Image (spheres, grey):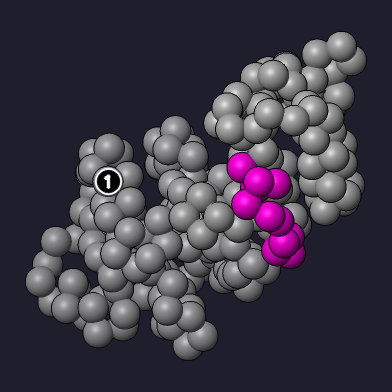
Amino acid sequence: MNNSSILVVDDEARMRKLIKDFLTQKDFPVLEAEDGEKALEVFEEKKNEISLILLDVMMPKLDGWSVLRKIRQESKVPVVMLTARGEENDELFGFELGVDEYISKPFSPKILVARVQAILKRTGKDESQTKDYGGIVIDQAGRTVTVDGKQVEMSLREYELLKYLVDNENIALSRDKILNNVWNYDYYGDSRTIDSHIKKIRHKLGKKGKYIQTMRGVGYKFEIK
């Protein structure tokens, strides 16, 4: 299953919204938890989808240290601690538990996003290369497609055609335009080859194949409804 989401754990709703707004601007899907107990619930349910955790230290019910201990018993997912404390002993304690990095409050949201991107790149989980289109997840780095968590085998041309459609989401594309951009002007046959490829892609996407709509007299359009 594709690891794509960032879990933001903080008891302040305003802080969670601020972080979420900046992360979603960079196409990072975000999961939220308002306390330590909820964080563990979300983690257990979505662990295969979580690529990084932003974890506040001081929270009700279960503090960040306790949450980190439990997560580290079964996962090495990158964890960034959000803390108002700046004491060296606290940071050393956190690193012993398995913290990947600290960010002290107050912080710049832009710097936070930059740190997240750097950590994901370092750990090989740069999700800016991965996007979710209504359950169809495309990993540009690996050139893979998954539908509801299951990888779908596609030929290079099928992948490129699907990628072109989703990159132009909600735009009606003519067959000629698709040929020119996907086949790169090196195809001299009948444009009906596009119809054949579309049919195969729809079949492989299953129920999600309905997102590829036929525009009568024009071509095709990818639209999530």
Residue 90, image x and y in percent?
19, 73
Residue 104, image x and y in percent?
21, 54
What amino acid type should be assigned to the residue bearing mark 1? Ala
Circle 1 sits on which residue?
A: 114
With respect to residue 166, does 46 lie above or below? below
Q: Is residue 67 toward the left or the right of residue 137 in the image?
A: left
Q: Residue at x 33, y 59 (%)?
A: 121
Q: Is residue 17 toward the left or the right of residue 183 in the image?
A: left
Q: Is residue 187 toward the left or the right of residue 116 in the image?
A: right
Toward the viewer: 35 or 179? 179
Q: Is residue 130 visible?
A: yes
**Quarter containing the C terminus:** top right
Toward the viewer: 48 or 101? 48
With respect to residue 70, does 41 lie above or below? above
Residue 222, image x and y in percent?
74, 29
Toward the viewer: 1 or 63? 1
**Quarter containing the N terminus:** bottom right
Q: Is residue 33 toward the left or the right of residue 224 in the image?
A: left
Q: Which residues are magenta?
A: 150-160
Q: Residue at x 68, y 29 (%)?
A: 188
Q: Please, which residue is most extreme toward the left here?
A: 88
Badge 1 marks a residue whose secondary structure is helix
